[in-house]
Image (cartoon, rainbow, N blue to C red):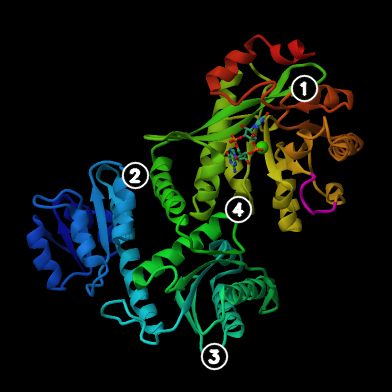
C-alpha cells in the first residue's frame, strides 16, 4: 500500500485508485487530497506519505513554493508537479526546485503517473543511501562530515536491456556482478562503490589530487568495462556511460549534486555511450530540453505526431526520380518541426527508438502504397534504420509487419543501414540482412567510406546499394583525396554490380563530376529537398524537371 498525498487536485485519486492496471497488479494506493498550501504543509510534516502530487496552481500559493520548501529538506519524499498547460519555464523550474517529474494534466495516463511515483520513491531511497555513504548528513543533506573533496561518478550500462534480452537474465546478473567487480578493481580501498539499482552504479572517491586524476579514473573504469567479459563460456561485450560531478566545486547540496551527475550521465549517453562527461552548468539547459523532449516523445508516439518527409533520389542517366528517402519529422505542439538529428539520439537513449522506428517504417510503407495509387507505381521508398533498432532481434518481424499491414510490394522497400551498424555484430547482421533480402527487400549501406571496416565485408554481405558519404561529396570540387575516394567507391560498386548514390549533392559542379564518373544516382538539395508526401507527389507528377534543367 502506498500513501499518496494529492495537493490541489481531486482527479489524481481517480487515476491511481481506479485504473484497471493498478487493480490487476494489486498495487493499492491510498490517496489523501488536500486543497490549500496551508493544509499541505501540515500533511507533509506528518510524514505519513510515500509520495506527493502537487498541482501547479494552489488556491493560496504556487505548487512550486511547496516543492521548494520541502524538496531539499529532511522530508525525503518525491514530489511530482502537475500543471495545466505545457510550459518550458515551469518544466525547468520544477526540476530546479527538486521535483522528480513534471506532467501536463491532460497528457497524464495512469501508467505514466504510477511509473513516475515508483521511480520517485526509488530515487529518494537511493539518495538517502548515497548521502550516508558519502558522509553527508542524512538529515540536511548538507555538510559533508569529512570535509574532503568528493568526486561522484554515476554509471549506466549501455543497451543493458538488449544484452539481457539476448543472453538471458541469469547471465545478465552475472554481468552485473562482473561490472561491480571491475569497478572495485579500478577504485581504491577508500572509495565507495554502490549499485543504485538495475544497471546503474555509483562511485564516490575522496582524496584525489586534481581534475586530471579524476579523469584518469573515469577512463580506466570505462576501458575496463569495455574489455570483453567471459560469462559461463560466452563472450559478452558491454560499455557504460558515465557522469561525473565534484564536491564542493560544482555544488554543495547533496541532492543537487546527484541531479548534476545524473544530467552529466544522461549527456554521455546521448553522446552515443561508452563515454564520460563532467557536469558543467551549461549542461543544465540542454539536458532539460532533452529530458523534456524524451518525455514528450512518449506522448507524441501515442498521439501520432511523427510522420515522414520525402527526399527524391534521381537516376543520373534517365534524370527520373526512382525513389524517395523517408526522413522522420516530429510536429511538436509548441516548437514546430523538430529534426531527427535532435530526436533520434534522444529516442535511442530513452529506449523509444523501437516504437519510433516502427512508426516511421509503417508510415513510409503506407505512403509508398498511396503513391502507387496516384500513378507513381515504380517509385520505391528508403527507410533509415538506426543501429539499436537494427540490433534488436525482431527487426525482420517489424519490417514484415509493416509490409503486411500496408500491402506494399517488398521490392519497393529499401532499408538504409550505416556501415558501423552492420559491422558491429557481423554474423548476426549478415544473417538478418539475408533474411530481409530473401523477402525481396533491398539493402543500402550509408555513410560508406567513413567506417574503419574492411571492404571485404561487401563480399559477404547481401547489399544492393552504397551511399557515398556527404563528407566526400562536399569535397569533390576542391579536394583531390575526396575525388579519388568518390571515384573508387563508384568503381567498386560498379565492379560488384550494385547501385551507388551520392548524398547531399548541393551544386552543379558536384553533379557534373558524379555524372562524368558514372555515379548511378544522386540526392541532395540541388535536386530536391525533403518535402511532405503531397508536395513530393506533385513535384514528380510531371517527371522530371530538376536534372534535365541542370544538365
Ligand atoms: P541521412 O540519412 O544522412 O539523411 C540525409 C539528411 O541530410 C537529411 O536530414 C536531409 O534533409 C539532409 N540533406 C539532404 N540533402 C542535403 C543537401 O544537399 N545538403 C544538406 N546540407 N543536407 C541535405 P534530416 O532529415 O535532418 O535527417 C538527419 C538524419 O537523421 C538522417 O541522415 C538519418 O541518419 C536520421 N534519420 C532521419 N529519419 C530517420 C528515421 O526515420 N529513422 C532513423 N533511424 N534515422 C532517421
Ligand atoms: Ca539516409
Give the mark, 2 or 1, whose residue is nearer the N terminus: 2
> Which mark is in front, 2 or 1?
2
Disc with the residue nearer the chain's start (4 vs 2): 2
Residue 493: x %, y % from top left: 86, 37
Viewer-nearest of discs 3 and 4:
3
Q: Is residue 63 above or below residue 157?
A: above
Task: State yes or no: Cβ of the residue under disc 1 lies below 8 Å from any atom of ligand 1.
Answer: no
Q: CA distance from mark 3 to mark 2?
A: 44 Å
Which label's residue is closer to the chain start, 3 or 2?
A: 2
| Mark 4 CB within 8 Å of ligand 1 | no
Image point (49%, 62%), residue name = 264
Which residue carries the number 2 mark?
A: 88
Q: Is residue 264 left or right of residue 464?
A: left
Mark 1 neighbour class, 10 Å CA radius: few under 14, some 14 to 19, many 20 or more: some
Quadrant of the rendering where the C terminus is positioned: top right
Instruction: Determine whether the residue tagged by mark 4 lies in a helix, strand or loop.
Output: helix
Q: Residues within 10 Å of mark 4 (few under 14, many from 20)?
A: some
Would you name the residue on which mark 1 appears?
Answer: 315
Figure quadrant of the N terminus:
bottom left
Nearer-the-camera pick, 241 or 142 = 142
What residue is disc 4 on?
388
* Horizontal relation, residue 325 to residue 520: left or right: left
> Is 146 rendered above or below residue 399?
below
Bounds of the magenta segment: 449-454
Q: Earlier in the sequence, mark 4 or mark 1?
A: 1
- The residue under label 3 is 189
Amino acid at each position: 500500500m502506498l500513501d499518496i498525498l494529492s495537493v490541489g487536485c481531486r482527479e489524481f485519486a481517480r487515476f491511481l485508485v481506479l485504473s484497471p492496471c493498478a487493480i490487476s497488479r494489486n498495487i493499492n494506493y491510498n490517496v489523501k487530497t488536500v486543497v490549500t498550501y496551508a493544509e499541505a504543509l501540515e500533511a507533509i510534516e506528518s510524514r505519513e506519505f510515500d509520495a506527493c502530487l502537487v498541482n501547479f496552481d494552489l488556491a493560496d500559493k504556487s505548487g512550486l513554493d511547496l516543492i521548494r520548501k520541502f524538496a531539499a529538506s529532511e522530508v525525503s519524499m518525491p514530489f511530482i508537479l502537475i500543471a495545466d498547460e505545457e510550459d518550458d519555464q515551469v518544466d525547468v523550474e520544477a526540476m530546479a526546485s527538486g521535483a522528480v517529474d513534471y506532467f501536463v494534466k491532460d497528457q497524464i495516463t495512469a501508467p505514466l503517473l504510477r511509473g513516475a511515483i515508483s521511480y520517485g520513491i526509488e530515487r529518494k531511497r537511493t539518495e538517502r543511501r548515497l548521502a550516508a555513504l558519502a558522509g553527508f548528513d542524512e538529515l540536511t543533506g548538507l555538510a559533508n562530515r569529512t570535509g574532503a573533496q568528493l568526486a561522484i561518478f554515476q554509471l549506466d550500462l549501455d543497451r543493458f536491456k538488449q544484452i539481457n534480452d539476448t543472453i538471458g537474465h541469469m547471465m545478465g546478473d552475472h554481468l552485473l556482478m562482473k561490472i561491480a567487480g571491475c569497478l572495485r578493481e579500478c577504485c581504491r580501498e577508500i572509495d565507495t562503490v554502490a549499485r543504485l539499482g538495475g544497471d546503474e552504479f555509483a562511485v564516490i572517491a575522496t582524496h584525489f589530487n586534481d581534475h586530471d586524476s579524476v579523469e584518469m579514473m573515469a577512463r580506466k573504469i570505462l576501458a575496463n568495462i569495455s574489455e570483453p567479459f567471459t560469462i559461463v563460456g560466452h563472450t559478452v561485450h558491454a560499455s557504460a556511460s558515465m557522469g561525473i560531478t565534484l564536491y564542493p566545486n560544482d555544488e554543495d547540496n547533496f541532492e543537487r549534486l546527484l541531479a548534476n551527475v545524473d544530467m552529466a550521465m544522461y549527456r554521455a549517453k546521448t553522446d552515443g555511450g561508452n563515454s564520460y562527461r563532467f557536469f558543467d552548468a551549461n549542461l543544465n539547459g540542454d539536458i532539460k530540453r532533452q529530458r523534456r523532449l524524451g518525455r514528450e516523445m512518449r506522448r507524441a508516439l501515442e498521439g501520432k505526431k511523427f510522420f515522414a518527409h520525402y527526399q527524391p533520389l534521381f537516376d543520373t542517366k534517365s534524370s527520373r526520380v526512382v525513389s524517395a528517402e523517408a526522413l522522420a519529422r516530429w510536429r511538436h505542439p509548441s516548437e514546430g518541426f523538430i529534426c531527427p538529428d535532435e530526436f533520434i539520439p534522444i529516442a535511442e537513449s530513452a529506449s523509444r527508438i523501437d516504437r519510433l522506428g516502427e512508426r516511421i517504417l509503417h508510415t513510409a510503407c503506407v505512403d509508398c502504397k498511396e503513391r502507387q495509387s496516384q500513378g507513381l507505381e515504380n517509385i520505391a521508398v528508403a527507410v533509415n534504420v538506426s543501429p539499436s533498432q537494427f540490433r534488436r532481434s525482431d527487426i525482420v518481424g517489424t519490417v514484415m509487419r509493416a509490409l503486411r499491414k500496408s500491402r506494399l510490394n517488398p521490392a519497393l522497400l529499401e532499408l538504409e543501414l550505416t556501415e558501423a551498424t552492420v559491422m558491429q555484430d557481423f554474423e548476426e547482421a549478415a544473417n538478418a540482412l539475408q533474411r530481409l533480402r530473401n523477402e525481396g527487400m533491398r539493402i543500402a549501406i550509408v555513410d560508406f567510406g567513413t567506417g574503419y571496416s574492411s571492404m571485404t565485408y561487401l563480399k559477404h554481405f547481401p547489399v544492393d546499394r552504397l551511399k557515398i558519404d556527404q563528407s566526400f561529396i562536399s569535397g569533390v570540387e576542391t579536394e583531390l583525396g575526396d575525388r579519388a575516394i568518390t571515384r573508387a567507391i563508384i568503381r567498386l560498386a560498379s565492379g560488384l554490380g550494385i547501385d551507388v548514390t551520392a548524398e547531399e549533392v548541393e551544386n552543379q559542379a558536384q553533379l557534373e563530376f558524379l555524372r562524368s564518373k558514372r555515379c548511378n544516382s544522386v540526392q541532395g538539395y540541388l535536386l530536391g529537398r525533403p518535402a511532405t508526401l503531397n508536395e513530393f507527389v506533385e513535384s514528380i507528377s510531371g517527371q522530371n524537371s530538376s536534372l534535365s534543367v541542370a544538365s
